[in-house]
């Protein structure tokens, strides 16, 4: 029993001294695209905003999957999840380039409000 307790204590002390940068990546990088279409319902947002952006995002490198959430208050949130082996900064740059390509197909009210592309931070990305 004493050896088991000592091993647990040593393990906890060792775990606390391990730098966060040494932790393995267990959560894939995720990029979030947000857009607002004032006065539009969820179906209108899906057809005029989410679909053009999703079509452009579908070919981005190392993307695993994506999903979008459209609300009746005129907001759209698209989440693009990338492979574990990729760099989140590169993924964000690629997603921004694809979003810029979709801007010409978006309604002018959406472009005027602005479309934001941001990186979702998780514990494994504190480096």
Image (cartoon, helix red, strand yellow):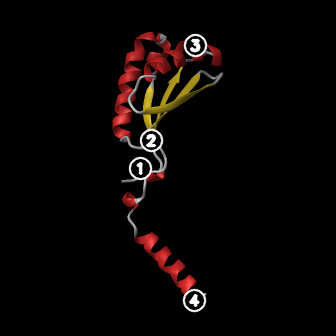
Q: How far apart are marks 4 and 2 (CA)?
A: 42 Å
Residue ID for mark 4: 2
Local secondary structure at mark 3: helix
Q: Distance between the residues labelled 3 and 1?
A: 34 Å
Residue ID for mark 3: 47
Residue 32 is marked as none
- Callouts 4 and 2 close, C-beta under 8 Å: no
Q: Is residue 79 visible?
A: no
Q: Distance between the residues labelled 4 and 3?
A: 65 Å
Residue at x-position 57% and y-position 89%: 2
Of the two numbered discs 3 and 2 on the same chain, state the one appearing first in sequence. 2
Q: Crowding at label 2, few (<14), some or many (≥20) Cα neighbours within 10 Å?
A: many
Residue 74 at x, y = what percent? 59, 21
Q: Is residue 48 visible?
A: yes
Q: Is residue 62 above or below residue 126?
A: above
Residue 29 is marked as 2
Residue 41 at x, y = what percent? 64, 17
- Callouts 4 and 3 close, C-beta under 8 Å: no
Q: How far apart are marks 3 and 2 (CA)?
A: 27 Å
Of the two numbered discs 4 and 3 on the same chain, state the one appearing first in sequence. 4
Q: In which quarter of the image is residue 104?
A: top left
Residue 125 is marked as 1
């Amino acid at each position: 029993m004493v050896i088991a307790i000592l091993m647990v204590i040593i393990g906890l002390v060792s775990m606390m001294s391990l730098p966060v940068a040494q932790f393995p990546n267990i959560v894939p990088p995720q990029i979030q695209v947000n857009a607002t279409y004032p006065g539009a319902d969820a179906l209108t947002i899906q057809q005029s905003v989410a679909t053009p952006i999703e079509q452009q995002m579908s070919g981005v490198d190392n993307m695993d999957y994506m999903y979008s959430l459209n609300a009746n208050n005129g907001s759209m949130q698209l989440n693009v999840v990338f492979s574990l082996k990729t760099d989140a900064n590169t993924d964000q740059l690629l997603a921004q380039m694809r979003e810029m390509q979709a801007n010409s197909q978006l309604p002018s009210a959406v472009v005027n409000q602005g479309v934001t592309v941001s990186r979702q931070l998780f514990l494994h990305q504190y480096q």
